[in-house]
Image (cartoon, rainbow, N blue to C red):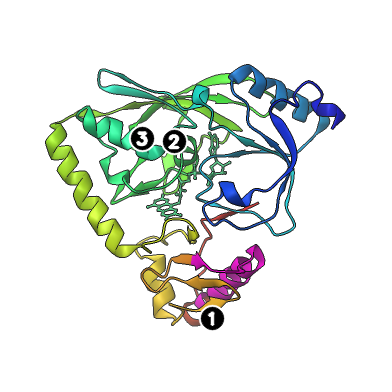
Amino acid sequence: MAFLSGLEHFVRANEALAPYLWLRIGGPSEYFAEPTHVDDLSLLVERCAEEDMPIRMLGGGSNILARSEGVPGVVIHGSAAAFAEIRVEGQEVVAGGGAKLSHLVSTCVGDGLGGLESLVGIPGTVGGALHGNAGAEGTDIGQCCVEATVMTRTGKILTRTADDLRFSYRKSSLDELVILSARLRLEQEDPAELARRMQKVWIVRRSHQPAREWGTGCVFKDPQGSLAADIIEQVGLKGTRVGGVEVSDVNANFITVGQGATSDDVRRLIDLIRGRVTESLGMDLEVQLEIW
Ligand SMILES: Cc1cc2nc3c(=O)[nH]c(=O)nc-3n(C[C@H](O)[C@H](O)[C@H](O)COP(=O)(O)OP(=O)(O)OC[C@H]3O[C@@H](n4cnc5c(N)ncnc54)[C@H](O)[C@@H]3O)c2cc1C
């Protein structure tokens, strides 16, 4: 680990990744880094660039499946306080990429700032949500984002302003290695009304998704004009099991992992669903879950 010399206080070798991932399965990462401030982070990124070492950013781990054989290179976990600050400035909020999305949503609702309340219950961090433009109920986080501070794969810090940010369904142009923070512009509204709206979304979400929190994953993107869950149900795969992994019988676009489940089981189940959907309906379902 010569290329990491001087960084040993926040980089570990061969770290189990499963505890950091929503699905709780998968192999270890070759190196795992938990920097506590931005200088450590940029030093690490620069070293990895010099060495051509693969490097990935982990948020809340709710959209990642780690392969059974493990993840080569460095995985960075940006959960330290320095990356998770949330600051309200009038009608704008500046949120760290490592802040929990749930914390951002509740701060906004409590301060009477409307626009993000439909995202209640989406797991993960602000950085993960911006990277994949997370959304629900016709709203997505990108609609509110007016600026982002990012770190490139060479360790350079840049500010991206509204005119060069693009968001579409589960996609964003924020593709640098790290989203350090983002500025979101919201609408002033009555906090009690926002809380009511948020509760309504929460109740609907709870009835349409598996009740368990950990050990679940949302697998496919919804094709335009339809729901992946309906399509999977239509081809008769609700409740289907491969090894220790099962298609949820509450919402067929979710999987739940049980005792002894492996990442290979998940991948086999994904292949089975895609194959059946293509065969029966001539459609190709796009996988939302990122496979590392
Ligand atoms: C039960 C459940 C319900 C879900 N419901 C929804 C839903 O309603 N709507 C929806 O859109 N999604 C949903 N998802 C998917 C998932 O929660 C979102 O994609 C979420 O935004 C991922 O955030 P994360 O922090 O967990 O990212 P991770 O899973 O950790 O990472 C996902 C991607 O984001 C990148 N990333 C993470 N942090 C950063 C950062 N700081 N800078 C740069 N890149 C970063 C990672 O490198 C990776 O490419 C659901 C998932 C589960 C398990």
In this figure, what is the number of numbered marks?
A: 3
The residue that label 1 is drawn on is 279
Beta carbon at label 3 within 8 Å of ligand 1: no
Mark 3 neighbour class, 10 Å CA radius: few under 14, some 14 to 19, many 20 or more: some
Label 1 or label 3, whichever comes before in sequence order: 3
Query: Can you tell which mark lies on residue 126?
Result: 2
Q: Which of the pair 263/188 is nearer the observer?
A: 263
Residue mark closest to the camera, 1 vs 2: 2
**Magenta-drawn stretch, dominant element (helix, strand or loop):** helix
Q: Residue at x 43, y 42 (%)?
A: 133
In the displayed structure, would residue 118 be above or below residue 254?
above
Mark 1 neighbour class, 10 Å CA radius: few under 14, some 14 to 19, many 20 or more: few
In the displayed structure, would residue 8 be above or below residue 232?
above
Would residue 218 be seen by someone viewing this image from the given angle?
no
Residue type, numbered disc 2: Val
The quadrant holding residue 105 is: top left
Residue type, numbered disc 1: Glu
Numbered disc 2: secondary structure? helix
Q: Which contiguous range is marked in magenta?
A: 256-277
Q: Are marks 3 and 2 in contact (CB under 8 Å)?
A: no
Mark 2 neighbour class, 10 Å CA radius: few under 14, some 14 to 19, many 20 or more: many
Q: Residue at x 32, y 45 (%)?
A: 119
Label 1 or label 2, whichever comes before in sequence order: 2
Q: Are marks 1 and 3 in contact (CB under 8 Å)?
A: no
For the residues labelled 1 and 2, the Cα–Cα distance comes to: 37 Å
Numbered disc 1: secondary structure? helix
Q: Which of the pair 109/176 is nearer the observer?
A: 109
The residue that label 3 is drawn on is 103
- Quarter of the image that includes the N terminus: top right
Residue type, numbered disc 3: His
Image location (x, y in percent) of residue 168: 42, 44
Residue at the far right in the pictured view: 2
